Image (cartoon, rainbow, N blue to C red):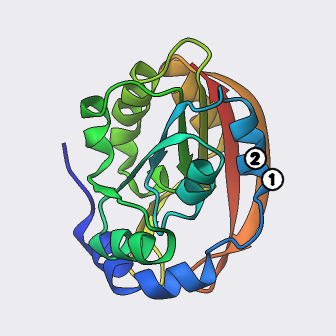
Amino acid sequence: MTGPDPETLAVYDDKAEDYGTRFCWDKPYPRLDAFLDGVAPGGRILDLGCGVGTASAQMRDRGFDVVALDPSEGMARVALDRHGLDVLQGDFDKVPDLGRFDAVWAHFSLLHAPRADLPRHLSAIHAALPPQGPFLVAMKTGTTTTRDRLGRRYTYVTETELTGLLTDAGFAPSEIAHGADEGLDGTVAPWIMVTAHA
């Protein structure tokens, strides 16, 4: 178990307020709403790598039992200040300790894990879900592992690689979307978002 990358974590701690200002949704997020429509009312959801807690707050406001997990103290502080969320501080390896969930949301968080650790993390997420439990994962696309302009480590994946990893972990990918957005470092990068079921 390698734990969070120290340099990546330091960037998020340092820039949490800026991140919260730039990426805090003030409107409904259609992909999140569609995901939540597939979860039983009041269901328990893991927001894996919740950041400043925007998605967690919307889940909570729709009546779900949310566990917001993130390793960054800075992000947790912003989530508390902006949304009144108590973030559980921890990394991806904490998932097996958290019990069972009805759904897991990993929105641009697992992309910071080392490539070699992805099978372990995905297997742990699968084990935490019931049969047919929904899982959304979003990552940036590519074939390398590198750092961005701010020093954050990214593991880039292809569609074939990500869907293969999901299938190997026991998931059935059901919906795939592609796009491109500007990140915190000011560069535009392509991404993939996959909804899968356990």
Is residue 17 shown left or right of residue 11? right
Residue drawn 62% across the image and 15% down it? 132
Give the class, few, some or many, for how many residues have Cα within 10 Å of label 1's Cα (few <14, many ≥20). few
Outermost residue, left side:
1
How many tags in the picture? 2
Figure quadrant of the C terminus: top right
- Name the amino acid type tagged 2: Asp
State the image coordinates of residue 113 (x, y, percent, origin top left): 38, 51
Looking at the picture, does residue 186 appear above or below residue 78? Answer: below
| Tag 2 near tag 1, CB within 8 Å | yes
Residue 110: x and y, percent? 46, 50
Label 1 residue SS: helix
Asked where in the image residue 28 lies, by quadrant, the reply is bottom right
Above or below, comparing residue 182 to residue 14 in the picture: above
Using residue 55 as the reference point, say whether residue 189 is left or right of it: right
Is residue 53 or residue 107 the one in the foreground? 53
Q: Is residue 52 above or below residue 177?
A: below
Disc sitting over residue 30 in the figure? 1
Task: Give, as a three-letter code, the residue at label 1.
Answer: Pro
Q: Which residue, as the protein is rendered here, is positioned at the far top?
A: 131
Residue beneath label 2, please?
A: 33
Alpha carbon distance from label 2 to label 1: 5 Å
The x, y position of residue 133, in whole percent, is 58, 22
Q: Quadrant of residue 10?
A: bottom left
